[in-house]
Image (tube, grey):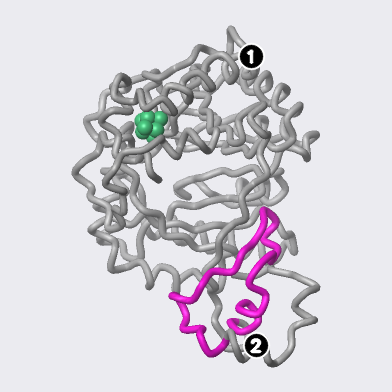
């Protein structure tokens, strides 16, 4: 990981370094701790040891975002479009043969503006400009991003793309955008496996686009957007995880291998290699994180797996986000705290409540 800075590093002695270097064995060492700006906030000696040993990639955890203390969602996912250019086999929405559960449309720009204008009142909202669509399928995407510009308090801002449509013009505009983290789902190290999973994409084009993006970022001298390359860990890709980290580790700001999520238990066939679910069912950890999702059609839901809006609290065209939070989300979470999830069909069959 690059771009970490800390004045505390200078204060470390050779003794600190020797202690950490003795236990540093590459991938399995304890992570360093970083904040939203990728600044080092914990594990300084470990970081210095990794640098001196020449490790280009250091495991890291991100310090918890401060949040809004229950007054408003801490994270908001905004589906700027439901359209997608791919049909990935593990996607519950766009895999071949899936009938659309809600219309495949762009979010209305006025709806987006309304939500963002309200969010400005709550400076600790972490914003994710994606859900189940590919953001670049929305032809006006940069107009949406421009609307974030006068709001430096809305950060970090995330956007995730499959990378297929990342051409030179978009790359230049992205580097000049208010996005803090740009995540590209590369999802593989070889054409063969990639094309079987990421249907309708092109591995060579995506790799070329990512290389162009990394090169343009390096030449720009900009610190953000931080480029995060990710791969989803499936049975088919598990053995490629370390090769993926090594392939991109020196060039990207963050490389991540994500555990596969079963979309609330609705995708049983793609078994995750890291199913560490506790045996005893407990309160949904997702709800404890205070996430809300605005679907492209304006429906607002409580859960990141509710892609068809069956748990919708109402539509943001009719209500404010604050009303939906106070009158909908908090009551829904309270039902979970009272262990009433069995009465909620999506939740009762869910296998991702612990993630
Ligand atoms: S239990 Fe599962 S479906 Fe229900 S809110 Fe939590 S993550 Fe979503």
The residue at which mark 2 appears reads as: 17
Horizontal and vertical percent for residue 30? Answer: 51, 72
Quarter containing the N terminus: bottom right
For ligand 1, tell me if the residue under mark 1 lies within 8 Å.
Answer: no
Horizontal and vertical percent for residue 53? Answer: 57, 88
Instruction: Tell me what residue is drawn at x 44 percent, y 33 percent.
Output: 304
The residue at which mark 1 appears reads as: 320
Q: Is residue 305 above or below residue 214?
A: above
Instruction: Tell me what residue is drawn at x 44 percent, y 69 percent.
Output: 245
Report how far apart the C-alphas of labels 2 and 1 lie in the structure.
Answer: 53 Å
Left or right relative to 58: residue 146 = right
Instruction: Tell me what residue is drawn at x 51 percent, y 29 percent.
Output: 79
Q: Quadrant of residue 35?
A: bottom right
Instruction: Provide the secondary structure element on which disc 1 rests.
Output: loop
Q: Quadrant of ligand 1?
A: top left
Horizontal and vertical percent for residue 4? Answer: 69, 68
Question: Could one spot residue 189 in this view of the protein?
Answer: yes
Q: Which of pointers 2 and 1 lies earlier in the amino acid sequence?
A: 2
Q: Quadrant of residue 228?
A: bottom right
Q: Residues within 10 Å of mark 2 (few under 14, many from 20)?
A: some
User: Answer yes or no: do the residues labelled 2 and 1 have beta carbons within 8 Å?
Assistant: no
In the image, which residues are magenta? 21-50
Q: Is residue 325 above or below residue 73?
A: above
Q: Is residue 322 above or below residue 2?
A: above
Left or right relative to 335: residue 280 = left
Question: Could one spot residue 305 in this view of the protein?
Answer: no
Q: Is residue 210 magenta?
A: no
Q: Nearer the viewer, residue 156 or 81?
A: 156
Q: Is residue 25 magenta?
A: yes
Instruction: Tell me what residue is drawn at x 54 percent, y 22 percent.
Output: 330
Quarter containing the C terminus: top left
């Amino acid at each position: 990981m690059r771009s970490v800075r800390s004045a505390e590093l200078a204060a470390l002695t050779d003794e600190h370094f020797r202690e950490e270097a003795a236990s540093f064995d590459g991938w399995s060492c304890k992570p360093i701790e970083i904040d939203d700006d990728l600044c080092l906030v914990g594990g300084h000696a470990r970081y210095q040891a990794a640098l001196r040993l020449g490790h280009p990639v250091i495991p890291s955890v991100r310090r918890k975002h401060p949040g809004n203390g229950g007054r408003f969602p801490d994270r908001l996912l905004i589906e700027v479009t439901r359209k997608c250019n791919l049909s990935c086999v593990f996607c519950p929405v766009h895999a071949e043969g899936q009938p659309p559960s809600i219309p495949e449309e762009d979010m209305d720009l006025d709806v987006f503006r309304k939500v963002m204008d309200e969010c400005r009142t709550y400076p600790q909202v972490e914003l994710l400009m994606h859900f189940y669509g590919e953001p670049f399928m929305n032809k006006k995407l940069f107009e949406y991003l421009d609307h974030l510009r006068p709001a430096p308090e809305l950060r970090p801002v995330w956007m995730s793309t499959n990378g297929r449509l990342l051409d030179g013009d978009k790359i230049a505009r992205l580097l000049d955008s208010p996005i803090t983290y740009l995540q590209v789902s590369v999802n593989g190290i070889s054409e063969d496996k990639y094309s079987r999973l990421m249907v309708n994409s092109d591995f060579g084009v995506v790799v070329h686009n990512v290389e162009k993006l990394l090169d343009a970022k390096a030449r720009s001298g900009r610190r953000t957007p931080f480029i995060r390359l990710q791969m989803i860990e499936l049975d088919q890709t598990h053995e490629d995880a370390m090769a993926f980290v090594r392939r991109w580790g020196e060039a990207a700001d963050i490389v991540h291998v994500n555990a596969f999520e079963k979309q609330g238990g609705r995708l049983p066939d793609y078994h995750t290699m890291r199913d560490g679910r506790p045996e005893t069912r407990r309160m949904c950890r997702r709800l404890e994180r205070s996430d809300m999702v605005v679907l492209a059609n304006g429906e607002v839901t409580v859960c990141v797996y509710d892609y068809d809006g069956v748990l919708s609290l109402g539509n943001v065209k009719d209500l404010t986000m604050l009303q939906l939070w106070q009158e909908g989300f908090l009551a829904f979470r309270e039902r979970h705290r009272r262990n009433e999830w069995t009465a909620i069909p999506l939740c009762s069959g869910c296998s991702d409540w612990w993630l």
